[in-house]
Amino acid sequence: EPSSLSGLPAGVGEALEAEGVAELYPPQQSAVEAGVLDGESLVAAVPTASGKTLIAELAMLSSIQRGGKALYIVPLRALASEKKTEFERWEDHGVTVGVSTGNYDSDGEWLASRDIIVATSEKVDSLIRNGAPWIDDLTCVVSDEVHLVDDSHRGPTLEVTLAKLRKVNPGLQTVALSATVGNADVIADWLDAELVESEWRPIELRTGVHFGNAINFDDGSQREVPVDRGEDQTAKLVGDALDTEEGGQGGSSLVFVNSRRNAESSARKLTDVTGARLTDGERDRLRDLADEIRGVSDTETSEDLADAVEKGSAFHHAGLASEHRSLVEDAFRDRLIKCISATPTLAAGVNTPARRVIVRDWRRYDGEFGGMKPLDVLEVHQMCGRAGRPGLDPYGEAVLLANDADTREELFERYLWAEAEPVRSKLAAEPALRTHVLATIASGFAATREGLLTFLDNTLYATQTDDEGRLAAVTDTVLEYLEVNGFVERERDGGAESLAATGIGHTVSRLYLDPMSAAEILDGLRTVADGADATPDAEGDAFVPADGADSDADEPGFTTYTRGDAAGTAGEDDGEESEGAAGSDSPAVTPLGLYHLVSRTPDTYELYLKSGDRETYTEVCYERETEFLGDVPSEYEEVRFEDWLAALKTARLLEDWANEVDEDRITERYGVGPGDIRGKVDTAEWLLRAAETLARDVEGIDGDVVVRVREARKRLEYGVREELLDLAGVRNVGRKRARRLYEAGIESRADLREADKAVVLGALRGRERTAERILENAGREDPSLDGVDPDSSASAAAT
Ligand code: ADP
């Protein structure tokens, strides 16, 4: 009985019982026996949805009860707030919870007072670099989804972060939660932890392959689901689950596909199946939900999602806005949405169980691989693990799809009967070590080459490898790079060699930049310093409408702007905007130049070039050549030139955003989702902020450059042209309303305080509540609109 659990804050056992935890699940019981309540380190490798979170909670709560402090590391930002909400139910028992998100470079001092802190591994890494004082007080650290140490981009950060935490704090209890993987024993070995490994699940899971007229399950049973020629396999399986009553309810399905586009088209197709099976009550509620979805943003994705949801079907992928994602997840858990078509991101983390999981695509396009590549066993197992809703379904079903008997056999062998792959460290690669070696030196974890190698001995890589020399060899390459670029100083004194971060090296580490990004940014900014005139115009009012054409309010991005005295690039007939510094041979700092500079650093994921893009961006490259900071690579250097163009595509997206181009247009033009725009903008803002700090810290960079960097960043922050910066900074205004206010003659925050209220109301399309809130946020003494005649506003605005 959980109430017999000892060493927890008062009332926790009873609270668990009230939640329906009558007794511990077997893996949880094993964890307690292994000493998780007594501060023992533990690796729990158990299937999805079998209660790993409670194991972590038992560890954290008992540690806190002994006077300690716990850190819960999540793999994704979206999961951080979800976990925080989950843990906040312990606040009734005196346990405080905080989540650390936001900028990489803040030190998170306020978290010192929290008992449980939730953060991503990148955030924790950054907090260590910035010397967050509470790191030393930690007694328990949980690493959720620890099998992601295998990921070549993010794995090394988790690995090094855990090694640092354990070094700072030798008695630290480390609890690592993992999916079932091939080598959980190696992870346990690395972390000096007990191992709890189990295949146990709270609900039986049947896995099988559908081919022809039936699903063949791995236990030898069959379920008939006939699919006639011309019928869609997925649709039949989704319909079959919905038509099978269990406890008075048909069952929902999760369909996994291999791309965002496929998720969207699958959801659209499945509306026929789900829409035909809704009750009137559900239809009404779904219509409300669809309205809510449309209210999040007025993009095509939003519209498509709402259209599908109205009929009980949804899609889910990383390009969705986070509000959209959570609306879909909640409605699916409430059984209102009957089917979600998702990319594999949904399989990791977010708790959305379904009666039936359908793995429609088991291959996906992989650029490095150069074609369609089969998914990892681990991934497919995690998708399958989403089948079976506790308390609702007698069992869960996970089904893979085959078109012929051979494929059916292959799927059984490859996935259903196979063990998940072993996890392998990706640390011994230059990009990973470049950043972590610098940070390790800068934060004082190592002061010599030997010390560095000893520190790296505490990583999973060292536990796993049989090639001792490799890590040392890559480390030496990286040290040389850091020295050449002035981030690290090496003093060779006889046999001993000492290492120290330079001032700029410290800054780079704290800013959480890849040292290569920092070097690229500094090189780019220095080309300006060398090239004299850093600003297009000393007054900052350099850009004037070429032909007074800013009247096309819906398409402000298509207004052609040019420099007052250099009309060289103005008036192009394709209507593309250009803020170029044509006609001048000295480099001038423009937003496009800065956006390109940060977009070509390794900290930005580039947009892919699609067919036709090469030509398009090559043209842009020549037209706007004077704006780039640094040399444009020759077209004959194929790879470098392609990368340059891909960065230019990203830079153009950012420029469009800062030129007030509609979100919808941007998603269409660049083939991205609205969530991607946000992601690119956030990354660029962060990098420009870092660039500003670097430019200030380093000698020889013109002060005007700093101003230009800040302006370019602010325009991204609000997605507006320069003249709207003041207005857009007022809460609740935003880019579109700012433009409408500006056109009604209200050009600043000060104007808002003085303006005729009827004009304000007219510009805000008669929305009184919004208008009052905006007036209040602008600091107006009397924001009330009582007695203001909205009808008079149209004529007032026209004047
Ligand atoms: P995992 O992290 O392993 O994917 P979760 O921790 O999310 O799984 O657990 C899945 C569900 O099982 C949760 O809704 C949780 O409340 C519930 N649960 C966990 N342990 C127990 C238990 N001992 N008894 C009943 N329900 C439990």
Image (spheres, grey):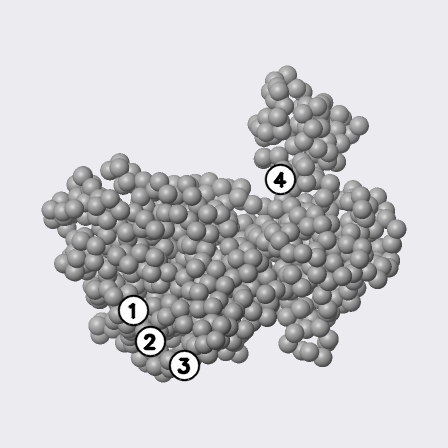
Circles 4, 2 touching at the beta carbon (< 8 Å): no
Residue 469, labelled with which disc? 3
Mark 3–mark 1 CB contact (< 8 Å): no
- Whether residue 35 is visible here, answered yes or no, is yes
Gap in angstroms between the C-alphas marked 4 and 2:
51 Å
Which amino acid, mark 4? Gly
Q: Name the element at disc 3.
A: helix
Mark 4 residue CB less than 8 A from any atom of ligand 1: no
**Which residue was labeled with disc 2?**
464
Front label number (3 vs 4): 3
User: Circle 1 sits on which residue?
Assistant: 190
Q: Earlier in the sequence, mark 1 or mark 4?
A: 1
Dot 2: element: helix
Residue at the (44%, 63%) spot, across then down: 440
- Whether tag 1 and tag 2 are in contact, CB under 8 A, the answer is yes
Which image quarter: residue 399?
Answer: bottom left
